[in-house]
Amino acid sequence: MDYHVFSHSKKHDFDLELVLTALKNCPTDDGDVDLKYYLQAYNELCRFFKLTGRLFGFVAADLEYKITVLDKKQADDRNGQFYNTTKTMVQYELNRALTLNRGSNPSGSRTLLRLHWALEFILEFMDRIRKCSDHDKTSKIATEVYEKTLSKHHPWLTRKMAAIAVYLLPSRKDLISVMCKQDYETVLCMLDKVVHAGQEVYRLTENIYKANNLLDIP
């Protein structure tokens, strides 16, 4: 494996258990999604992308920006309470015709939809990783998953950057051993739980957006 492509300052820093706990806390009793825990999970997922150094730096930067947008909306003294869950956020922005807002102050609905798209890629990638062999190239898996999920939402330049980034990914064993806080066997056992918890969050979010005709916010 070519280790120099990874960030050396903080190895074994990605905490999959934190992601699992946050995702399991996302669903509410009424079929909603708690955005506090959603963003907690995403903050840790961003750490994974940042640890790959220049490989997925552009992905991490984009995700961090979107997390910051939602964090600021939640922290707003006047309207922050409307951004506690996905349903309350969507309803609030629909009632005020805010959902299509973009630019310097994008809507929460538009921003979350982009995170939702990325979550599909992340969960599918994790699912394929847990099923492959130790020495399978994760670059091939990432390419196939990206083409199936996120690529349809990205412009040509981003697709080209992603193709270069995934080409440099190592084998499953090397990737997990270098990046994750938990040991290799623990990570393999946890991946199944993370994928299942994440799929439930994805399903709930998808249902909320579909019910409100918001799955194609430009």
Image: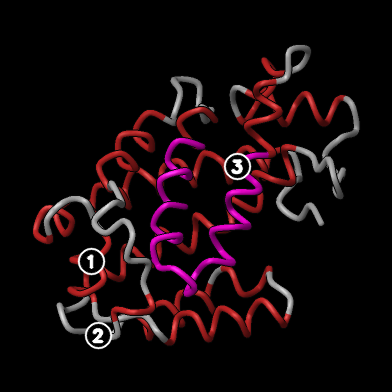
Q: Nearer the viewer, mark 3 or mark 2?
A: 2
Rendered location of residue 52, percent (x, y): 40, 68
Q: What residue is rendered at 61% in x and 74% in y?
A: 151
Seen from the viewer's position, the closer of residues 204 and 80 is 80
Seen from the viewer's position, the closer of residues 118 and 60 is 60
Q: Can residue 117 be found in the magenta stretch?
A: no
Q: What residue is rendered at 68% in x and 68% in y?
A: 153
- Please report whichever mark, 3 or 1, sits nearer to the chain's N-terminal start: 3
State the quadrant of the C terminus: bottom right
Range of magenta residues: 39-68
**Separation of marks 2 and 1 at Cα, in angstroms:** 11 Å
Taking the image as shown, residue 74 lies to the left or right of residue 142, namely right
* Tags 3 and 2 touching, CB below 8 Å: no
Picture quadrant of residue 137: bottom left
Local packing at callout 1 (Cα closer than 10 Å; few below 14, some 14-19, many 20+) is many
Q: Which residue is mark 1?
A: 178
Task: Identify whether 72 is placed above or below 192.
Answer: above
Q: Which residue is mark 2?
A: 1
* Tags 3 and 1 touching, CB below 8 Å: no
Q: Secondary structure at mark 3?
A: helix
Q: Which residue is mark 3?
A: 67
Rendered location of residue 150, percent (x, y): 58, 68
Task: Identify whether 19 is placed above or below 45.
Answer: above
